[in-house]
Image (tube, rainbow, N blue to C red):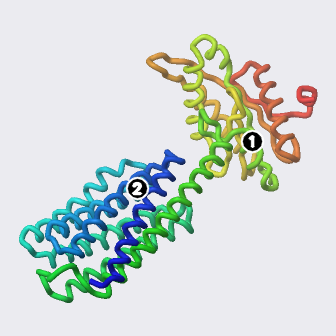
Amino acid sequence: MSLDYSTILISVGFSAAGLALAVLGGWLLVRSERFMLTWAVALVFIVGNVVAYGRHVSTPSPVMAWLSMVFLMVGFATIYGASVQFVRGVSPVLPSIRAAVPFVVGVSIPMVFGLDGIAFFVENAGAAILFFMTGIRYWTARAEAPAAITAIAILHGIVGFGFALCALMIALGGKVVLDGPPQNWAEDLSLVVGLVGMTGIGALSLSLTQWRLGARHRRDARTDPLTGLLNRRALFELFGSRPIEVGTAVIVFDLDHFKLINDSLGHHVGDRLLLEVADRLMACVRGHDSVARQGGDEFVLVLTELHEDNEILAIVSRLLEIISQPWMDEGQEYGLSCSVGISCYPQDGGDPDALLRCADAAMYKAKASGRSTYHFYTPELNQAIS
């Protein structure tokens, strides 16, 4: 075994150890990205593989060879588990175990009978399969961050291809028992590709974690923390980011007697009620409409692509119907109702703020008219919003 190979092997070990610390640090900064912790654990196994395999290279030993194979299979299976955790948000334990067991068994049985050639073939073929599986898993999630995740998927494929070449060279050699560790150009190439590829994957994963953190902050700034709907700021940004088109209407509605529910039953019940209303509200709107919570018990809908008043009335009627359905909470039934105000572009205003003020005035008119009803904005309500 050449000095260059040993030097590269040592470099891989130090690189994996350093990357494990960097990834662990990334997880400590963003605890919600738990796939990074799984990645760090996987890299510890890979460091164990490098140490055991280095011992086998310097002094061939079936035990060290077998231990290095087990470490490698478990490490790469854990990397696959991290990809499942990243994409699906589930625990990586079962996916990692399911991925590792077949290959750990696959390398262990030949080693028991001294057939290290077969074991090394299974190890390299297994590593290739695990990397291909991981790359495919990331590829399915590339819509979240196309450039970074696509690059991660491709790098997994490239590293997997390097291991596939090693398996192919062992198979072409035709030896079921080797004289020592495999020695060929594919082994050298695979180490270099693995060193560069794993470093690149780690760096991209760290940048992806920061991107996710930034995206989460942006989402939190635009989202009502209780209901998950848009907040007032996000509504104005969305509403004001494009020209208002004819066929746009703004609906403001307020729950009737909500303060009484909060005062008599407690804010925890009121919060559960608001969550229920948000769910019901989402069932009333179409995909291209916007829904927001302005604050308290007041909600806003921005309807677009309306072609006649009947469409508005159909949505408002549906809204009144679905909100007025009894609400069950901890075995207790509560009656609900709401008051709705409506404004339309262009007759009721030419900008988002004007339309919202007009719809708000119409909503108060609906409350004054007996609640559980709706009211279109009319110029006579100017006094109410002046």
Q: Badge 2: few (under 14), some or many (20 or more) residues near its Cα, within 10 Å?
A: many
In the picture as drawn, the residue positioned furthest to the top comes out as 264
Nearest-to-viewer mark from 1 and 2:
2
Q: Position of residue 101 (x, y in %)?
A: 21, 59
Q: Position of residue 225 (x, y in %)?
A: 61, 35
Q: In the rendered image, which residue does mark 1 sit on?
A: 233
Name the amino acid, label 1.
Arg
Q: Nearer the viewer, residue 246 or 145?
A: 145
Q: In the rendered image, which residue does mark 2 sit on?
A: 40
Q: Position of residue 56 (x, y in %)?
A: 21, 72
Q: Nearer the viewer, residue 132 or 9?
A: 9
Q: Nearer the viewer, residue 231 or 242?
A: 231
Q: Nearer the viewer, residue 97 or 46?
A: 46
Name the amino acid, label 2.
Ala
Vertical order, 144 against 252 (above or below): below
In the picture as drawn, the residue positioned furthest to the left comes out as 113
User: Looking at the image, which residue is at 26% across and 55% down?
Assistant: 97
On residue 116, the disc is: none
Quadrant including the N terminus: bottom left
Vertical order, 83 against 123 (above or below): above
Mark found first going from the N terminus, 1 or 2:
2
Report whether residue 314 is seen. no
Marks 1/2: CA–CA distance: 39 Å
Quarter location, residue 17: bottom left
User: Looking at the image, which residue is at 22% across and 63% down?
Assistant: 70
Quarter location, residue 293: top right
- Give the side of residue 86 with respect to residue 161, left or right: right
- Give the side of residue 43 with respect to residue 173, left or right: right
- Give the side of residue 65 with respect to residue 294, left or right: left
